[in-house]
Amino acid sequence: MYRQPLVALESTVIAHGLPYPHNLDLARRLEAAVLEEGGLPRTVGVLQGRPLAGLVPSQIEHLATHPGVRKLSLRDLPVAVARRLDGATTVAATMWISHRHGIEVFATGGIGGVHRAAHGGPSFDVSADLDALARIPMVVVCAGAKAILDLPATREVLETRGVTVVGYGTDEMPAFYSRTSGLPVDVRCDTPEEVAALVRARRDLGLPGATLVTVPIPEEAAIPAGEIAPAIEQALEEADRRGLRSGEVTPFLLQRLSTLTGERSLRANLALLEHNARVAARIAVALAPPRYA
Ligand code: PSU
Ligand code: MN
C-alpha cells in the first residue's frame, strides 16, 4: 500500500492556546505550510461527537470561534463522543485519533509535561501528553515542552517512559520560546531522512510509543530564557492565586504570558508552530516511499 505523507495537526492550540483571530489564521497557515512542503494536512478535532482527522475549513472555523468548544484530552474523548459534543483535541487526544486513522506524523507547538510544583511539594499535574507519547507509536514534532513547565522533570519522564527524543539540528532539547534548555536529547538528526531511518528502526523493533522530534524555534522569533523567565514566574503566581486546576492551567498561562510580553510570546508561538508543521511535512515525505508512475 502506498503510504501518503499525511501530517496531523491538533486543535487545542487553535481553540484554547491562541486568541482569535490569530488562531484561525494560524490554523490555515499550518495546513498551507504542510501542503507547500509536499505533505497532506489533517487537522484533528471532535464535532458533534465524531472524532475526525481532516477537518474542512468550516469545521476549523467553528472550533476557532465558538466559546463552548471543550478541551479534550484522552479521558474526555468518550464523554464527548457519547454526548455528541464539540471539542478541540490536545496532543494526547490528537495522537489517539490520528493513530486510529493511520496517520504517523503529527506537528504541534509544545507538548504538555510535568507542571512546576506550586509550594515546594509535588503538584501531580502531569500532562496526559507524556502518557500518550509512551504508548502511541507516532512521530511528534514540537519545539520541546512548553516553557511554563518543569522542563528537567519532563525530560526525566520522557526517558523513563521510553520516548526517543530527537534534537532536530541540535544537541539540546529546545525550550519552546528559547532554542536551548541545557537538557540533552537522545540523538541529533540533521535531515528528514535521518529521522525517517530512526522511525523505521523503532517500527521494526516493535516498540510502543513515540519518536519526539524537538525543533528549535526559528532564531528571529526566539526569546532568551532569561528574558521570558520573570513573565513565567508572574503568570504561575497568578494561576496559583486563582486556584486554577487541571486543563485550565495551560491556556491561562499562555494567555497571561502573551499580555505580559506585549504579544512577543504569541508571535514566538505562531512562528514555532508554522516551522514545526514544515519540518513534520518533510519527515512525512521522507517516510513515504517514492511513487512509480
Ligand atoms: N502547543 C502550543 N500551544 C498549546 C498546546 C500545544 O503551542 O496550547 C496545547 C496542546 O494541545 C497540549 C496542551 O496537549 O496544550 C497541554 O495541555 P495540558 O498541560 O493541560 O496537558
Ligand atoms: Mn494538566
Image (cartoon, rainbow, N blue to C red):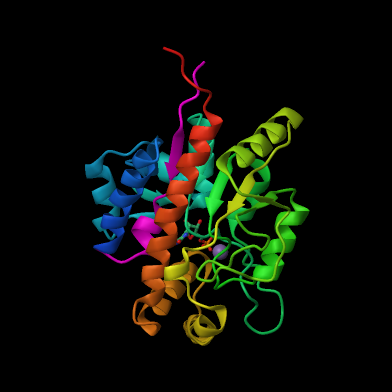
- Would residue 128 appear left or right of 162 to someone viewing this image? left
Asked whether the viewer can see residue 266, the reply is yes
- Would residue 105 appear left or right of 163 to someone viewing this image? left
| Residue 196 x/y as whole percent | 61, 36
Q: Nearer the viewer, residue 105 or 220?
A: 220
Is 13 located above or below residue 255 in the figure?
above
Which residue does the image show at 72% across and 62% down from the upper left?
Answer: 184
Asked whether the viewer can see residue 83, the reply is no
Q: Which residues are magenta?
A: 1-20
Which residue does the image show at 70% across and 38% down from the upper left?
Answer: 208
| Residue 133 x/y as whole percent | 63, 48
| Residue 34 x/y as whole percent | 38, 42
Q: Nearer the viewer, residue 51 or 61?
A: 61
Residue 4 sits inside the magenta stretch: yes
Q: Nearer the viewer, residue 139 or 174?
A: 174
Residue 142 sits inside the magenta stretch: no
| Residue 238 x/y as whole percent | 47, 85
